[in-house]
Image (cartoon, coloured by chain):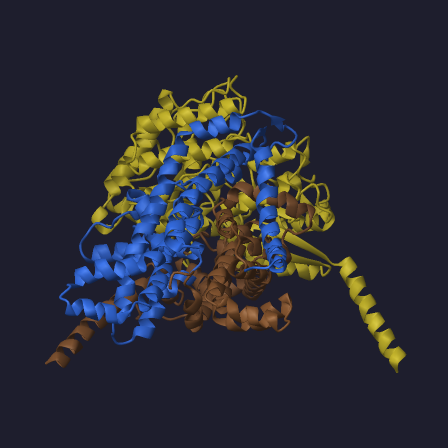
Amino acid sequence: MKTRVLSLTGAAVAAFLGASAQAETLSIATVNNGDMIRMQKLADHFTKAHPDITLNWVTLEENVLRQRVTTDIATKGGQYDILTIGTYEVPIWTKQKWLMPLDKLGAGYDADDLLPSIRNGLTAGGTLYAAPFYGESSMVMYRKDLFEKAGLTMPEAPSWAFVADAARKLTDKSKEVYGICLRGKAGWGENMAFISAMANSYGARWFDMAWKPQFNTDPWKQTLTTYLGLMKDAGPPGASSNGFNENLALFQTGKCAMWIDATVAASFVSNPAQSKVADKVGYALAPDNGLGKRANWLWAWNLAIPASSKKGDAAQSFIAWATSKEYLELVAKEEGWANVPPGTRSSLYANPDYQKAAPFADLTLKSIQAADPLKPTVQEVPYTGVQFVAIPEFQGIGTGVGQAFSAALAGQVSADQALQNAQALATREMTKAGYIK
Amino acid sequence: MARAATNRRKLVLTLLAWTVGIAMFFPILWTALTSFKTEAEAIASPPSFLAFHWTLENYAEVQARSDYFLHFMNSVVISLGSTLAGLLVAVPAAWSMAFVPGRRTRDVLMWMLSTKMLPPVGVLIPIYLLFRDSGLLDSRIGLIIVLTLINLPIIVWMLFTYFREIPGEILEAARMDGAGLREEILFVLLPMAVPGIASTLLLNVILAWNEAFWTLNLSASQSAPLTAFIASYSSPEGLFYAKLSAASTMAVAPILILGWFSQKQLVRGLTFGAVK
Amino acid sequence: MATAHSRAAARLTMAPAVVLLLGWMLIPLAMTLYFSFLRYNLLMPGTEEWIGTLNYQYFLTDPAFFTALGNTLALVGGVLALTVCGGIGLALLLDQPFWGRGIVRLLVIAPFFVMPTVSALVWKNMLMNPVNGLFAAVARGLGLQPFDFLSEAPLSSIVLIVTWQWLPFATLILLTALQSLDRERLEAAEMDGAGAVDRFVHIILPHLARAMTVVTLIQTIFLLSVFAEILVTTNGGPGNATTNITYLVYSLSLLQFDVGGGSAGGIVAVVLANIVAVFLMRMIGRNLDL
């Protein structure tokens, strides 16, 4: 009797050990954006197909996430197997050999289907180091009903002059309708993403070919004074603390006549479950100033694996699943075509079902194609990146400049003073980092 | 006549006190109410206080997205564990400060408190490296160690001020009767100091529960407490007030209820020697 | 009268706490000190080199540093003043007889239990937001222009949020002290014709001195490192309007990943904290006869 119990226990232990030797647990660090939350909900489909893999999710707000994963990968802490990182991080981290090459995504993955402008930013030496989960550019979202009432017609490719004029005409502060909502919250990924893209269309650049900051030049002055004037006359109150999320909430509740922001927002503002104005939204390309560049940025959230991870194979199979064509179909089946993560695959934009469900599809694709990370602005630059500069020091400089501009938006300093502060700060940091000798 | 005046005075005081009390509590109340609204009602203008369509969908959504009970248990284990560990180290130290004070006792105590003034961000990277090398990243043990060390000075101080109120003669009498140091502390000192220990324990559980820097930076998925749970709701896309409210209510409610139920015990010893 | 035996026992019992705290303080501090003399960016491993005091030069000449120093003092001072004054007022009120004292006391102490992150999120989004917040709705209801708290008066708004969190603590300590006041003395003074103000200034206030000292000491310790409230509400802005020393060090080491610069800032912050500590100890020593 006793031996039987013992042997049974032994068998159970052996079975348990056997199981745990096979089973792998993947820790996935991701952003709390809608598309990622959906991925987390649908991940059951993946674990059903891979019963030997369990998933642990760490979902954090963007800035906290960036800080956590950067600290972890730079110190080789090894807390995560899959990281969600942006287009800014990928080239820098690849250069440091922090990322595992994604060479086991499987035969059916079809990497050639990825949009070239997105894919180029994630590739080094012909190998993919991160797989895009969704990609975005920027565009104008506007309220068709308000435009009609004011007798205005939005062209498909508006100029800044038109946008500024329309914004002022559409503002009715007594009814809490503001002509235009733009980002104002300080941060290199918040207000500076928008302002840098806008500056590109005015012919401004972050650095000249000798890495000297350019905030003392005329194009920056034009950009900033236009932006500040527009926000003063036609922007919502509290704009200096509005980022993407705050503006999205404003637009969805009908407080903005126009909003220039990420193309992914199109599916949120047109979703009747979230948006009061879902049936009244029109779309247009980001504005230009006649210099041949539009205020289009380019960004993608990507999945990548730390080079030190010992669970590379399992992690790659998850990434292959989450960024595949099949995943897009799965989302379409479960939640409708309008909700699939956009901006990564050409086949999606050729799909008639998607085009029908997402009236913004065509403009999204055009916007993504219009942005060129290698030649972001009118003049030549020593860096890559449209609304960022792909050097490690940029986060600090970008956020510092963002603070200076948000102070100007809050009315604490003048535009000239803000530019002067930005120039001083950027020069200081670039000197310290050794770019300026 | 005098009675009426007293009653009128009491009525005025009652009104005033309730106004102040409700004003202080209002942000919490408003959050709790909002957590039962739909997202659209949460930002409706003018806002409605009670006459809205009550729903539990936000709680369901939050629970579907993150494992509340895992985070809750982590919070419980970490805050209780670090407090108990802190008491274990602090009781002997406070005993010696209170009953065998030397010339440097005051300096040592003040030095201990001054360690709490160091900005934690300044030493995050060194600690992260140390934790990585000792395998403590994302472990409850690691967080218990850090929070013990962070709150140790407060624990020592609270116990010290409380022990000082206890007449040393009683301990001495026990010593005369042949009690060793261990018996003296365990069987004579501690029973007399129960109220002080209870309030020390409560205050430190609260402080540890609400500590948001180390718990967020040294945890990932396994050991993340409620402070990390709330970090995923801070500004998701789109309308989020109702979901944020639900998550906030879930993160705050346990400690608030504990605090309310034990407020008598908490207050009794919460004097830091301020009452003579 | 302490014997040699109990002296030895005292050292022994003190040792664990002292050794632990010493280790907790010295090991990271030594590493931080070492890092502060290096060019050390987390994003560029392998490029660390000794650069002497360059990090300190940059940190101390950073215009943001002096703003941050001023903001730190304003934040600590503002919150201390508000919580001590408000705490005395609340304690006096809660000490009076009125209906429902127990419940009001529960309502008043509630904010102390709320985690800083949550309270910052709630104040920022649900109360102070100039479009969707409750205060804005109230202002509109009264026909007023909504006030944009976090960009018009950012530092004051943060002082308000932090005060809300710490007022209950101050109230509790002051209330306990107040309740230990000898009532007969008050009554005797009243008989002698002392007015309410006289009684407050000459009897109540001196009696509360120790409690006020304790509140000041404990709160200063926590207020010097206020961080979550700033991170959540304003990210230190607009401009540097709400950047305190802790946030400045954070932005160097964890937003810019400049570990060298952040470490130098950390060391400067430690030095400043010690100055405050010495200052506080002096004050406490006089008032708390430890």
Does residue B40 show up?
yes
**Residue A168 sits in quarter:** top left
Residue C153: x and y, percent?
Answer: 29, 44
Left or right of C50, for residue A244: left
Left or right of B245, for residue A56: right
Where is the C terminus of chain B found, in terms of image quarters? bottom left
Q: Is residue A414 above or below residue A168?
A: above
Q: Which tint was used for chain A?
A: yellow
Q: Residue furthest left?
A: B1
Camera-nearest residue between B270 and B258: B270
Q: Which chain gets the blue colouring?
A: C
Residue B240: x and y, percent?
Answer: 42, 57
Does residue A377 show up?
no
Residue A154: x and y, percent?
Answer: 33, 39
Q: Which tint was used for chain B?
A: brown
Where is the N terminus of chain B found, in terms of image quarters? bottom left
Q: Residue furthest front?
A: C1
Residue B198: x and y, percent?
Answer: 50, 69
Q: Is residue C193 above or below residue A60?
A: below
Q: How many marks?
A: 0
Q: Residue furthest bottom?
A: A1
Please tell me which residue is depicted at 54% across the width and 43% down the height of the picture.
A67
